[in-house]
């Protein structure tokens, strides 16, 4: 297969680079501002450039890992967030529709408002609370409307050794501070980028690209950011007090869902997979941080 990966310098993109198998597939890794060897420049909001790379290279699968992911900043830059998270996936999807490529597009639990305490199935009514969530939902809609063959994967709370993520932030804070306060009233499920990347390659490797639809994929388990921080601190051996606090103690200007656990019944049944628990994947990730 010839696979185009966008956003290759981000958490998920870099993880996909780590597990690439060049005996099986040909890859084109791209990012808007590539700073890494083997990554080509492609701004997914440049429609002409997207069309050219998809058509000229006979791409069969596009994995869109590119996104505007700064949830707080998106509140004041909603237009930019929409350009990258909504319009650009539409452009990729139209290019895929024209050439017959399959688009694997990554979305988020933030399409939901979190005003329930029942895990969200794929067909639950989205109601994003933030500009980021609205832009990602618009991206899903643009992909579905394009007529391309697509697999949309909604994930959540990504962590890895790469980029900026909560696990790395907590590791840094707990190594340098006597205590750290973390919100206990936002509940979800962390996702190791390694597990998500393996799942994406599993779909491609096992000829499951025809299983069009929207799927939830996170690790197994449910926790608060506080629980996650506590676990990170415990595994690291850092001597720091991890203290619970409320979202209202730290106003950030962005409203996040209080409960964004995703129901994974559909993805597990459709693809016949088992998903690791977040605690196991966290342990693995932290053992391989360096
Ligand atoms: N991180 C999470 O907790 C989380 C949770 C749920 C879902 N997701 C979704 O999962 C996917 C991967 O997330 P991630 O954490 O790997 O994101 P990430 O680390 O922020 O990586 C995104 C990459 O896309 C690049 N990019 C931004 N604008 C671009 C453009 N116009 N054209 C091409 N590349 C562009 C970014 O470059 P710059 O760094 O230079 O901007 C970055 O290298 C995204 O769709 C995200 O919405 C993430």
Image: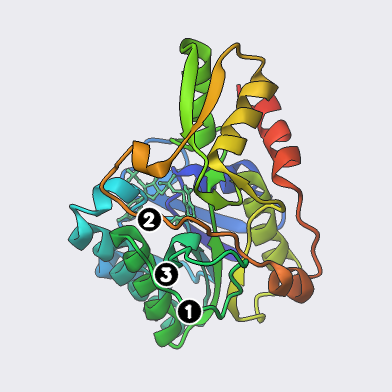
Residue picked out by circle 1: 125
Q: Residues within 10 Å of mark 3 (few under 14, many from 20)?
A: many
The residue under label 2 is 67
Mark 3 to mark 1: distance in Å?
A: 33 Å
Q: Where residue 142 sits: x, y (%)?
A: 37, 79
Q: Earlier in the sequence, mark 2 or mark 1?
A: 2
Residue 20, percent across and down?
A: 64, 48
- In the displayed structure, does residue 268 sit left or right of residue 260? right
Q: Residue at x 42, y 69 (%)?
A: 54
Quarter occupied by residue 211: bottom right
Q: Is residue 192 visible?
A: no
Q: Alpha-carbon distance for marks 2 and 3?
A: 18 Å
Left or right: 273 in relation to 63: right
Secondary element at tag 1 = loop
Q: Residue at x 75, y 47 (%)?
A: 277
Q: Is mark 3 within 8 Å of ligand 1?
A: no
Q: Nearer the viewer, residue 225 or 63?
A: 225
Regarding mark 3 in the picture, which secondary structure is present there? Answer: helix
């Amino acid at each position: 297969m010839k696979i185009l990966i966008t956003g290759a310098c981000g958490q998920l993109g870099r993880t996909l680079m780590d597990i690439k198998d060049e005996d099986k597939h040909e890859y084109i890794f791209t990012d808007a501002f590539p700073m890494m060897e083997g990554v080509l420049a492609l701004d997914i909001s440049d429609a002409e450039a997207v069309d050219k790379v998809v058509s000229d290279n006979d791409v069969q699968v596009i994995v869109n890992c590119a996104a505007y992911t700064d949830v707080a900043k998106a509140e004041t830059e909603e237009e930019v967030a929409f350009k990258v998270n909504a319009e650009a996936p539409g452009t990729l999807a139209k290019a895929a529709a024209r050439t017959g490529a399959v688009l694997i597009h990554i979305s988020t639990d933030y399409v939901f408002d979190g005003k329930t305490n029942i895990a969200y199935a794929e067909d639950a009514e989205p109601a994003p609370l933030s500009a980021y969530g609205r832009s990602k939902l618009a991206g899903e809609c643009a992909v579905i409307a394009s007529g391309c063959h697509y697999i949309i994967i909604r994930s959540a709370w990504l962590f890895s050794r790469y980029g900026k993520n909560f696990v790395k932030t907590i590791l840094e804070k707990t190594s340098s501070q006597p205590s750290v306060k973390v919100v206990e009233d936002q509940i979800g499920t962390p996702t190791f980028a390694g597990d998500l990347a393996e799942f994406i390659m599993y779909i491609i490797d096992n000829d499951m690209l025809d299983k069009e639809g929207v799927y939830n994929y996170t690790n197994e388990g449910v926790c608060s950011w506080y629980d996650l921080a506590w676990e990170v601190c415990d595994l690291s051996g850092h001597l720091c007090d991890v203290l619970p606090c409320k979202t209202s103690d730290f106003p950030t200007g962005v409203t996040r869902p209080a409960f964004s656990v995703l129901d994974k019944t559909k993805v597990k049944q459709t693809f016949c997979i088992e998903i690791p628990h977040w605690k196991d994947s966290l342990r693995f990730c932290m053992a391989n941080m360096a």
